[in-house]
Structure formats: structure tokens, C-alpha cells
Amino acid sequence: MKHLFNISTVSPQLHVRTGVLLFFLLSFSFFLFVSSAQAATLGFSAPPIVGTSSPFVVEVWLDADVAINAITVDLIIPAGLKILDISDGNSIINMWVEQPSQSPSEGGDEVSKVSASGIIPGGYSGKKGKLFSLQLQATSLGSNSISIDSTTIAYKSSANADIEKVTSSPLRVSVEENITNPPLDLEDLESPESFTPVRAELPDENDTPVWFVVFIAQDKKSGIDSYEAAESSKNLSFEEAREPRALEWKVATSPHLLQDQSLGSYIYVKATDKKGNFRIEKISPDKGRWYEQPQGYILIVLVLLATYVILHKKTRRTRPA
């Protein structure tokens, strides 16, 4: 039940992501700003020569002369480079429709694809706006090339959410013997940024209105790894809520179905980054309804986006061949 509107279940297929992004952009046309320039380039930052003894990092970034409100990225990773980790820390994208993830490519089992789709309310224009980063390990000597798939597209900040072609030059990485890769800066001692969970009344799978808690958090370094939620009659301080046995935490995805449908409990949401740092936010019984806070409108639209995706996928599964 709690996975009914789970954004992380979005299909990586282009037409599904396209519909989701357009739905959002047209629904939020008041966020858009028109620009006359027309250029979007996907670029990479990485050592030109690496060795096989240790991992190295590739940053994926966006150059945009025109304000971009959303982007869908598909990267092709060659067989000679093994993906160890993907991080969306410090990304210009703060609303992921599909978080950066690895999937097998149609090019073969040994070739990988990294896919991601995200939204930037208000738009982004500038140089080297970070999208996400890859931690890779070279497995053999020789030359490797990371490139974008033709399904990589962006959406301009215009009233019609016009498609903007994304150009890119392949990243060529040479793997040689006796090369020491630059040390990785993996330290992350900071908690995720403060966020605002809100309550929302949404239909369940039987179209019965029920209460959920909706949330989105960001982490500027290693990226968000997981969420947990808890409900309690106790009004705990943040120090008390941090104690291991203070609350009965449950793994959560947004939106998360509330057990106390009377809304008489305090709601706690914990966001944990990939290095184990976490932040806890709380909703009091008499606060936190979505229409009481501006952030609530955006979160509810994300729920509608995810609902659209799930219904679209169900329609595809039941459509006759």
C-alpha cells in the first residue's frame, strides 16, 4: 500500500518519463521563464588517464544558455568501466522523477546504462551545473568512451515546455599501467538539509481517501540513501528522537501511509544519506497539512506525477499486443 505512488518505481523508458516531465512542466507554467538562446550541452569532468588499482570519479554536468526546467539523461558506460556508486549529492536537480540508477543496456550485457530524470523548478541556466557523479573502476587497459544515448533530452522553461536538444562530446578515458588515480574525496560529515514533510489526503487503491505523509529531502554531498517514518503520541525533542529505541521506525517511501488516520499522533520522518548521516523532521498533530505550506503544493504534484506513471504502466501491461 505504501508503495502505491512510489516515485522510485518510474519506468526508465523514454515515453513514460517524457509524459511525466511534460505533465509537471505544463502544470507549473507559472514557474517558467522564457529565454531566446537555445543551447544545452551535457559534459563530463574526469581524469583523462587512469589506472586499474583504484576507483575514480566522473562528474556529469549541464551547460545551458537557455533556462532548462527538466532533463532526461541516459549514459552508455563501456564494458571496461565498472560502476561502483552513483551519487546525486549537490545536484542542481532537486526533484527526481527517476533517481540516477544503473540498468543493462540494449548494447549488450557487459555494457551498462545510467538513467536519470529530474525537474528544476524555476529553471537552470549556467555553466557546469552538476547533475550527478559516477564512481568507476577500470577493469582493463585501453581506451574507453562514455557517451549519451539519443534519448537524452531537456525541456526549456517556456509556456509549452519545448524540447531542447542536448549535445555532448564523448568522454574518452585512457586506462594505462602504473597510473595512480587521484584520491577520492568521500568524506561526508554533514546531515541532509532541513526539509518539510506535510500531511496529505489521497485516494488509496480502492479510491478511499486516506492520510499520507509526503516528503522530499536533499543532501549536498553523498546524496539521500533512505527514509524512515514513525508515529508516536509523544512530543519528543530531536535529541530524544535520535535515540535508537525512542521510536519504532519503519522504512518509508513518499507518500507514506499513516497508521493513525485520526491525525492525533506526532509524525517523525528521518532522511539518511549514503554515509549514514541523518536528519529528523517532525509534524505536530495540529500542523503540517499540505495546504498550510507552500512546499505542500509541489509535493502533491509529485504524488500526482507518480500516480500518472503507475497508471500508465498498468495500462501498458493490460493493452492487447
Image: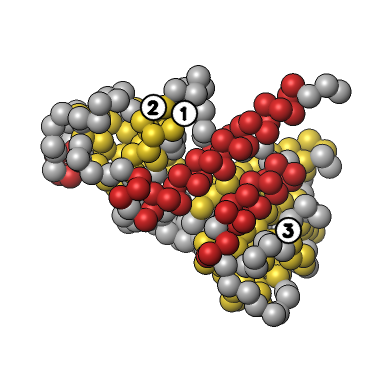
Instruction: Give percent across and percent down for residue 291.
Output: 35, 48
Q: Mark 1 packing: few (<14 Cα in 10 Å), some, or many (20+)?
A: few
Task: Name the element at disc 2.
Answer: strand
Q: What residue sits right under mark 2 in the picture?
A: 210
Q: What residue sits right under mark 3 in the picture?
A: 153
Marks 2 and 3 sit apart, C-alpha to C-alpha, by 37 Å
Residue 315: which disc? none
Instruction: Please say whether residue 83 is visible from this viewpoint.
Output: no
**Residue type marked 1:** Pro
The quadrant of the image that shows the C terminus is top right
- Which residue shows up at 49% across the image and 24% down it? 207
Q: Nearer the N terminus, badge 2 or badge 1?
A: 1
- Which residue shows up at 84% across the image and 42% down it? 107
Instruction: Please say whether residue 5 is visible from this viewpoint.
Output: yes
Instruction: Give percent across and percent down for residue 315.
Output: 71, 27
Q: Are marks 2 and 1 in contact (CB under 8 Å)?
A: yes
Camera-side residue of 172 and 11: 11
Please indicate whether residue 106 sits to the left or right of residue 54 in the image: right
Task: Name the element at disc 1.
Answer: strand
**Residue type marked 3:** Ile
Between marks 3 and 1 in the image, the one whose residue lies nearer the viewer: 1
Task: Name the element at disc 3.
Answer: strand
- State which quadrant residue 179 falls in: bottom right
Question: How many marks do you count on the picture?
Answer: 3
Camera-side residue of 243 and 52: 243
Up/down of 13 relative to 142, above or below: above
Marks 2 and 1 sit apart, C-alpha to C-alpha, by 6 Å
**Residue type marked 2:** Val
Up/down of 137 relative to 180, above or below: above
Q: Nearer the N terminus, badge 3 or badge 1?
A: 3
Q: What residue sits right under mark 1 in the picture?
A: 203
